[in-house]
Amino acid sequence: MTAGFTRRQFARAGAAASLAAILPRGVFALPTANHKAIIRADDTIGLVRPEFHSHFSEHLGSCVYGGLWVGPKSPIQNVEGFRKAAVDYLKELGVPVLRWPGGCYADDYHWREGIGPAPRRPKRVNVWWGNYVEDNSFGTHEFIRLCRLIGAEPYFAANVGSGSPSEMRDWIEYCNFPSGSALADERAANGSPEPFRVKYWGVGNELWGCGGNFRPDGAGGEFRRFANFARAFGGTTPFLIGCGPSGNDAKWTRGFMDSLASSRLPDGYSIHYYVNGDHAPLEYAPETAMAQLAVFPQVEQAIVEQRALLDGYDPARKIGLFLDEWGVWDRIPQKDQERNGALWQQSTVRSAVAAGLGLNIFNRQADKLYMCNIAQIANVLQSVLMTDGLEGKNCVRTTTYYAFMLFKAHRGKTAVPVDVGARMLAGDFSPNAVLPPEVSISASRSGSELVVSLVNPRASEDIEVECKLRGAKAKQGRAQILHDSDLNACNTFDHPDRVTIRPHEVAVEPDRIRIMLPAMSVATVTLDIA
């Protein structure tokens, strides 16, 4: 197992009493495993930054066009060209930060082509995602307006691969200089006299791949060159994010950081980690679902080990570790992409469980992370919203949306350690078997409230969990759950509310809670404590 949490052995004889007395009979017919955990509410890990729940939008498939943006003349109900249902849902979710315009698209995007009167903006071919013609009707001003509408902080990914330091430097001035310069006056003439005050700036994207196929020392050299021209304007100092590796690549991080020598260190350092799957989103069986979810401990390991590498160069931890792109990436049928756009991926109960596993990791590693951005916000990969494109009026909240809603209560609280006991099983596994993760738990506390989130990633096994409380006494509590008996269940345009958050039974005693988690479920318990 990875670092960051402790595992202790418990004997079966010490297991808590069954929940059969408080739960309806016959609800859980699958085999049941018992787990014990200790929530150390008198200890701390770190702040659960709201930025852990941030999102990513790229000019890819129908994420932006048809997902978020339909245009002001669209018959679809909109707010200044933005799909109204999407704005309403994202505002309710509370998106802390939104990253744009890519992704691979960022390193072929030139920001000046997306400003000024929309009819005059040049049409360009999107070489990364299907060679479709991009009309640039959604550009800098539109993105900033979207962020303001949903309450998100904007995060720009600047063009390193086909751009220049002067292009990024001018974009920063255009966005942030108050007035009086040619660029600031141009922004005002384009309808925004007040500066945008954009803080977050990614210096390229995936420079090891689509961002330029750099070697790590070359990518570090580009960061030095671009950072030299990034300036504070109008009191907004750019927070510059350097390009880290794909996955847990120590060689890349060492090469990148070594190349910086005595020059400016990045304010943030970004890694990308997708959990890939070999099956179409609606075609997972219990075994294949668990094999995919079994990768999440490696994500946690990457966070721990990449943070340790950065600490060697930055003992004071001034560099924030970003998980800039994460989520499940299934095998997407070509017919789905032809109908709905590139990388259009349905979100299922399995996807929600994956989201819960990731969000629990962020809580457990709260002292090591600065920001995490799931990919992507609408229609593409593990999205929170799904729409039926520029011609359709439908917009539904996915299972992943509701997983984020279950974790919303953790934001701004202090994560506390959870010690998880050994799984109690009769029988043995083959030594060559691929084991999915055990029950996943995280907890956070603020004042008299303690929030506990639990995930059962097992596809064919219910889990009974007893969590003992240390350093706190529970007075009362309530639980909510996200679950469906079909791991491929999803919210569709015909059935938009099939998988939603529902109340759930939890037994609360002063020194413990007991809860039954059905197979493939995500639950959150909120406790009033003394």
Image: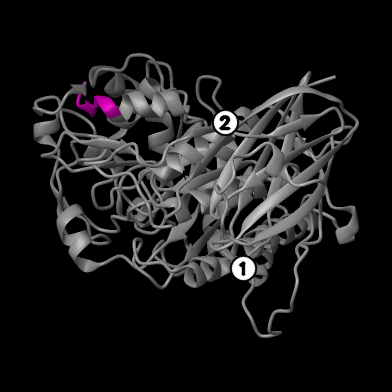
Question: Is residue 378 magenta-colored?
Answer: no
Q: Quadrant of residue 386?
A: top left
Label ID, residue 252: 1
Left or right: residue 436 versus residue 288 is right
Q: Earlier in the sequence, mark 2 or mark 1?
A: 1
**Quarter of the image where the C terminus is located:** top right
Q: Is residue 247 visible?
A: yes
Please report the residue visible at 64 percent of the width from the left and 81 percent of the height from the top.
433
Looking at the rendered structure, the kind of residue marked 2 is: Lys
Question: Does dot 1 land on a helix, a strand or a loop?
Answer: helix
Residue labelled with disc 2: 408
**Camera-side residue of 294 and 137:** 294
- The percent position of residue 434, horizontal first and vertical second, equals 62, 76
Frontmost of labels 2 and 1 is 2
Q: Give the crowd class for mark 2: few <14, some 14-19, many >=20 residues within 10 Å.
A: some
**Camera-side residue of 470 and 230:** 470
**Camera-side residue of 64 and 508:** 508
- The percent position of residue 211, horizontal first and vertical second, equals 41, 61
Please report the residue visible at 41 percent of the width from the left and 65 percent of the height from the top.
212
Please report the residue visible at 53 percent of the width from the left and 51 percent of the height from the top.
353
**Quarter of the image where the N terminus is located:** bottom right
Q: Give the crowd class for mark 1: few <14, some 14-19, many >=20 residues within 10 Å.
A: many
Question: Does dot 2 land on a helix, a strand or a loop?
Answer: helix
- The percent position of residue 77, horizontal first and vertical second, equals 17, 24
Looking at the rendered structure, the kind of residue marked 1 is: Trp
Left or right: residue 83 versus residue 197 is left
**Camera-side residue of 231 and 36:** 36
- Per the rendered image, the range of residues in magenta is 80-85
Left or right: residue 278 versus residue 522 is left
